[in-house]
Amino acid sequence: MKAAWGSADLMAQSSVNAALGLVFFMPLARLISKDQMGVYAALVSSVGLFQTVGVFGLNFAAARFVPKLLGEDKGREGGAAALRIVQLTALFSFAAFLAYYAFADSLSLFLVKSAMWGRIFRLGAWVVFVGGLSLVSDALMQGSRSSGGCAREPPFLLSTA
């Protein structure tokens, strides 16, 4: 049951983040040109797609399975699962980063019909990598909090030896 609350917390937080993004987007829309708005939309959409692929659904696994193990007093298994999730996320996010970085100019040309925005898209590759790690870390902390694990220590710091 605690794992379900961790997932619900994660969903609520994502909803709040989306609402705040909309609130901050409104002034931005008034400050930049239509062309720049198109670049912004293409960048946000493509980063979101690559980030989703890079995370590979491990944020949901982190929010569900780690707290389940911690709730069953299986700290070692929970710590090992959390560590493996972080390792896999780093690997998949790095692969998504490399792909996004390598195809930044092509994405710019394809999505906004100009290669001049390639530098901005290459910066987006870093957002893909760091954002993927952030999503999974956040899910681990949310899940750990729902299982009472944050009172002790984050699950990926538990001994796996």
Image (cartoon, rainbow, N blue to C red):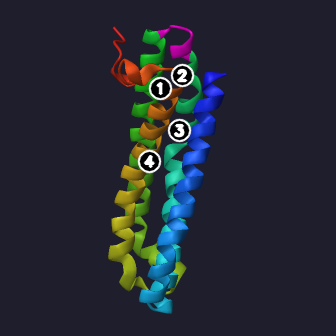
- Secondary element type, mark 2: helix
Circle 3 residue = 59
Lower position in the chain sequence, tag 2 or tag 3: 3
Q: Could you tell me the amino acid type at mark 3? A: Asn
Q: Could you tell me the amino acid type at mark 1? A: Ser
Point out the frontmost of discs 2 and 4.
Answer: 2
Lower position in the chain sequence, tag 4 or tag 1: 4
Circle 4 residue = 132
Q: Which residues are magenta?
A: 69-74
Circle 1 residue = 144
Tell me where residue 11 appears, x and y as whole percent. Answer: 61, 44
State the CA–CA distance, disc 1 to disc 3: 13 Å
The residue sitting at 50% across, 91% down in the picture is: 34
State the CA–CA distance, disc 2 to disc 1: 6 Å
Tell me where residue 159 appears, x and y as whole percent. Answer: 34, 12
Point out the frontmost of discs 2 and 3.
Answer: 2
Residue 133 drawn in magenta? no
Lower position in the chain sequence, tag 4 or tag 3: 3
Disc 2: CA contacts within 10 A as few (<14), some (14-19) or many (>=20): many
Contact (CB < 8 A) between labels 1 and 3?
no
The residue sitting at 44% across, 20% down in the picture is: 149
Q: Could you tell me the amino acid type at mark 4? A: Gly
Tell me where residue 151 appears, x and y as whole percent. Answer: 39, 21
Q: Could you tell me the amino acid type at mark 2? A: Pro
